[in-house]
Image (tube, rainbow, N blue to C red):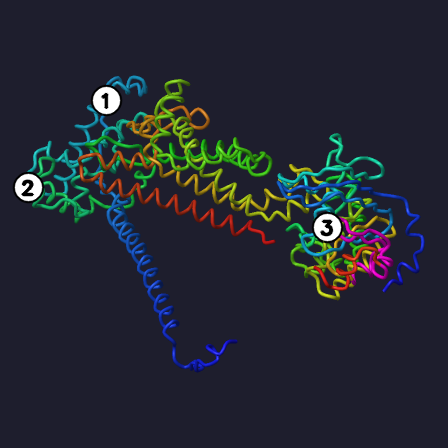
Amino acid sequence: MTDATAARPTPSLLAQDNRTRHRNRAEVRFRAFGMAAMGTGVLALAVLLASVVSNGLGAFRQTFITFPVVLSQERLDPDGHRDPAAMARVTTFGYAPLIGRAFADHVAALGIETGLGPRAMAAMLSEEAPGQLRTAVLANPQLVGETITLDVLASGRIDGYFKGRVTLESAERDRNVSPEQLRLAETLAQAGVLTTRFNQNFITAPDASGQRPEAAGLGVAILGSFYMMLVVLVLTLPIGVAASIYLEEFAPKNRFTDLIEVNISNLAAVPSIVFGILGLAIFINFAGLPQSAPIVGGLVLTLMTLPTIIIATRASLRAVPPSIRSAALGLGASRMQSVFHHVLPLAAPGILTGTIIGLAQALGETAPLLLVGMVAFVREYPAPLPAGLFDPASALPVQVYNWTQRSDPAFVERASGAIIVLLVVLIFMNALAVLLRRRFERRW
Amino acid sequence: MNDLQVTDPTVQTRALKISARQVDVFYGDTHAIRKVDVDIADKTVTAFIGPSGCGKSTFLRCLNRMNDTIDTARVAGKIRLDGEDIYDPRVDPVQLRARVGIVFQKPNPFPKSIYDNVAYGPRIHGLARDKAALGGIVEKSLRRAALWDEVKDRLGAPGTSLSGGQQQRLCIARAVATSPEVLLMDEPCSALDPIATAQVEELIDELRRRYSVVIVTHSMQQAARVSQNTAVFHLGELVEFGETGQIFTNPNDPRTENYITGRIG
């Protein structure tokens, strides 16, 4: 100790010196920044969820109108043989007047004065109704001649009225709906003919055209997304894990492997639409696979997901302590035995998490699918596996994109509803990832 | 201090197990080991001592080719096990390591049950015909490692749940279970308390009856206590090699004397 330091008076611990005060202030500032950043994030998330949920919940409820219909034989089966082939000659145009008249009769029977013509009355029902009735009759020809109670969707505008999207004022300016129709709907609701309830068709039904938002559902999109996820899982997991194990545990460290490593990292950052162009060129134009098929969408998403999975897998392999490898090698295990008996089981939770996160990312991907034709309007469900992989299908995020493009405001609600379905699936997948990690994580 | 050597005068007559001649080791451009000659006798404990970074662990890891796992490491010279060159291109290091086992500085049990830890070696080498035989090997190995009485009731418990000293004895049991001819120990007691150290040292003396044991240690007392032969390393060179009693009481090289008396290292 020199004299200079010894001469300084001993500072009191009870008072902060300037340096300490300065440091403490910096810490308080930093914490405030952190909390502000977190608050912004939470707020943004809350706004997003609130807007999606408030817009989309309506899609899960739908307005139905219930009334009896006489399935007259002379209209639906003029020959009277109940021969499905002959009955199929009657198109939906044969069914529509039947339903329209039955509805008008039922309203009249209830003693409600409408002042609406038959056309205007029929317009309150979904254009989907004749088709649905025809399918039901063709499936069960014995129904002809009976009187059945029909439960048909109300048209999108009527439905919108009960969800607050359409008002009497907006109906004045709307060619598709009149205030009289809305007033009638109100009366029918009081009479119990018109009800709003849970609509499972939103989950199971296929998409519908722009004029029938009330009938549009996610069935084909969910099935298509599911098929694609199967393709992605079956391809990326073995390819990604094998590539990672080879690169991490076996490959010599030289310029070539360095180059591969850099390129894998770069691929993970390539815009996803580029993979779509690649898929279009290779899988459709060169390999001749069908357009709009889950197999092609799945292959494109596989290409996109592989780098993510390889990076996650390599990270979790690297996180296994080298002492475990040494222990196995020291006992006379071969490199492959040390990897498969010891390293891989320890890395498995990380690999699983990486895979599920990669899948979740692929599930939400839209851009590359647009290029391989998944954007098509598909009403037919794809066949069961494996043939269904080659049938046209849609995908959940693409369905959202599709619906936001349509003019009828009812589709805004549908799109938000589809986003809710997508988010629920993603939350479920991420929860699964967390659960698996907890379950299989081992300490060393 | 040198009681062991006094009571065991037959040390020099033991058969030669490993002979190393003119061994050089390079890590990239670093010359880690220079021209080392060491003879390791069968059924003896040979200690490697020397200051930190002198290359004794590196040399130990050459004896079962664990250095192969380090990409930049290169070994030159001849190391013979029972007269066969272990660096011959025809030698599969996996086969070599089954005969020359190793215990590391830090206990590194597999995150599996105690039973599976010990049974792993016999399983991959096909040493047991059936479950009963495997159980027998596990029990014998744990007994040899003086761990049996402590763990016999919880063989299904994870090896990582044991205390540090128990873990190290588990690693020794694991190494012993494959019936190696040579057991390499890289500072096996550096992470252990004095009681566990004493147990491991007792164990090493016990193991000497069946195996040739090579131990790297920082503790000169330990070298004196457990070994019959001692090699002194300094800056990658072998300073002196001989009978432990002679090294500690009457060293030929001034550097050995300096190290033992605490002036270097």
- Which quarter of the picture shows residue B199? bottom right
Q: Check chain identity for marks 3 and 2: say if they share one.
A: no
Circle 1: element type: loop
Q: Which residue does the numbered mark 1 point to in the structure image?
A: A91
Residue kind at label 2, given as amino acid type:
Glu
Residue kind at label 1, given as amino acid type:
Thr
Nearest the viewer among B28 and A276 is: B28
In the picture provided, is A27 more to the left or to the right than B218? Answer: left
Residue A172's disc is 2
Q: Is residue A340 visible?
A: no
- CB of mark 3 within 8 Å of CB of mark 1? no
The stretch in magenta equals: B221-250
Q: Disc 3: which chain?
A: B
Q: Nearer the viewer, mark 3 or mark 1?
A: 3
Circle 2: element type: helix
Residue kind at label 3, given as amino acid type:
Lys
Nearest the viewer among B98 and B221 is: B221
In the picture provided, is B91 more to the left or to the right than A368? Answer: right
Q: Disc 1: which chain?
A: A
Real-space CA distance between mark 1 and mark 2, rounded to the nearest whole angstrom: 34 Å
Q: Can residue A371 be seen in this view?
A: yes
Query: Mark 2 or mark 1, which is nearer the start of the sequence?
Result: 1
Q: Which residue does the numbered mark 3 point to in the structure image?
A: B56
- Local packing at callout 1 (Cα closer than 10 Å; few below 14, some 14-19, many 20+) is few
In the rendering, at what x and y percent does residue A115 appear? 5, 39
Real-space CA distance between mark 3 and mark 1, rounded to the nearest whole angstrom: 92 Å
Nearest the viewer among A163 and A122 is: A163
Q: Disc 2: which chain?
A: A
In the rendering, at what x and y percent does residue A145 appear? 26, 27
Q: Within the magenta stretch, is there residue A272?
A: no
